[in-house]
Amino acid sequence: MSSAAVLASREEDIMMMLAAQAHVGSKNADHQMSPYIFKRRPDGLHILDCAKAWEKIQLAARIVVAVENPADVIAVSARPYAQRAVLKYCHYTGAETVSGRYTPGTFTNQITKQYREPRVLIVGDPRQDHQPVKEASYVNIPVIAFCDSDSPLRNVDVAIPCNNKNKHSIGLMYWLLTREVLRLRGEVSRTEAWAVPVDLYFHRDIEEIKAQEEAEAAAAAPAATWEEPTTWTDEAAPVGEEFGADAVDAAAGGWDPTTEGFGPTDGSWDAGAQAAGSWDASVTPAAAGWS
């Protein structure tokens, strides 16, 4: 690969670091991190040198590639924002990870079930991951760490200066390290872009995922359409078998009170006959004053 292409790739990587704010440090600074600090802004934040960060990524990738068995490289991170990036790095490079809380004695106590003997250790923050860094110094394991401006460099062999408190920054740095390791192994070409997007390395909250799923479901759901209410026609009217032939005749020709015992068939109405036939006029009313 020509030097011009290498410089172009370097510029693109540095532009991505600037977009992810990987160069923005904290207000505090450790004296051992002073070679990696470019300047201090008026608001008190320290600016890290992206060129040195890119060089340290190249150095760290060469150290990782030098290990024959990829499983002998262990990546650890106690910071929640970096756990997703660590899992993705181990997935693509074949390294191992200690997920969740780090158990003290993993590198030194041989009688534990989780005992490991790695050849290289990668940590996301040497301050929060101080226990594995300290144990690695006991058994002579080289340590690669992503360090902020206030990170201690005690027992750290390769310090990659970056903002390790931002989910986009730490995800991008792990993505760059993964891509460089695969390029040195020959699995990814330097002349072509890596097919894996950097978004997969970013931490995502559960609430953010649920909100996105609900928005996608609402967008995919079909819009409610108004339908004209159905009305009965002459063909769809109920037939005689459902309501009876008499109801059909009454609806068609009008209601006849003389049918079905509703009144006399000769058209006259005799109250006396009705009283004689069914009423008992001699019966005393139950309540006084009734007539």
Image (cartoon, helix red, strand yellow):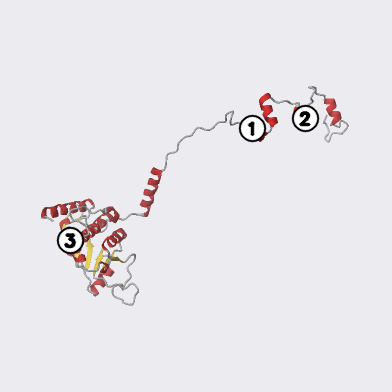
Mark 1 and mark 2 lie on one chain; the one further toward the N terminus is: 1
Residues packed near mark 3 inside 10 Å, few (<14), some (14 to 19) or many (20 plus): some
The circle drawn on residue 239 is: 1
Instruction: Give the structural element (helix, strand or loop) at label 1.
Output: loop
Label 1–label 2 contact, CB within 8 A: no
Q: Outermost residue toward the top?
A: 267
Q: Closer to the camera: disc 1 or disc 2?
A: 1
Instruction: Give the structural element (helix, strand or loop) at label 2.
Output: helix
Q: In the rendered structure, which amino acid carries the disc numbered 2? A: Gly
Depth check, front residue: 191 or 113: 191
Is residue 233 rendered to the left or right of residue 209? right
Indicate the position of residue 265 as horizontal and vertical percent values: 79, 25
Residues packed near mark 1 inside 10 Å, few (<14), some (14 to 19) or many (20 plus): few
Q: Which residue in the structure is indicated by mark 2?
A: 261
Q: Which residue in the structure is indicated by mark 3?
A: 58
Instruction: Give the structural element (helix, strand or loop) at label 3.
Output: helix
Screen quadrant of the C terminus? top right
Indicate the position of residue 108 as horizontal and vertical percent values: 28, 75
**How far apart are labels 3 and 1 at the CA level?**
88 Å
Which residue is rendered at x = 36% and y = 48% of the image?
212
Indicate the position of residue 290 as horizontal and vertical percent values: 82, 31
Which residue is rendered at x = 85% and y = 26% of the image?
273
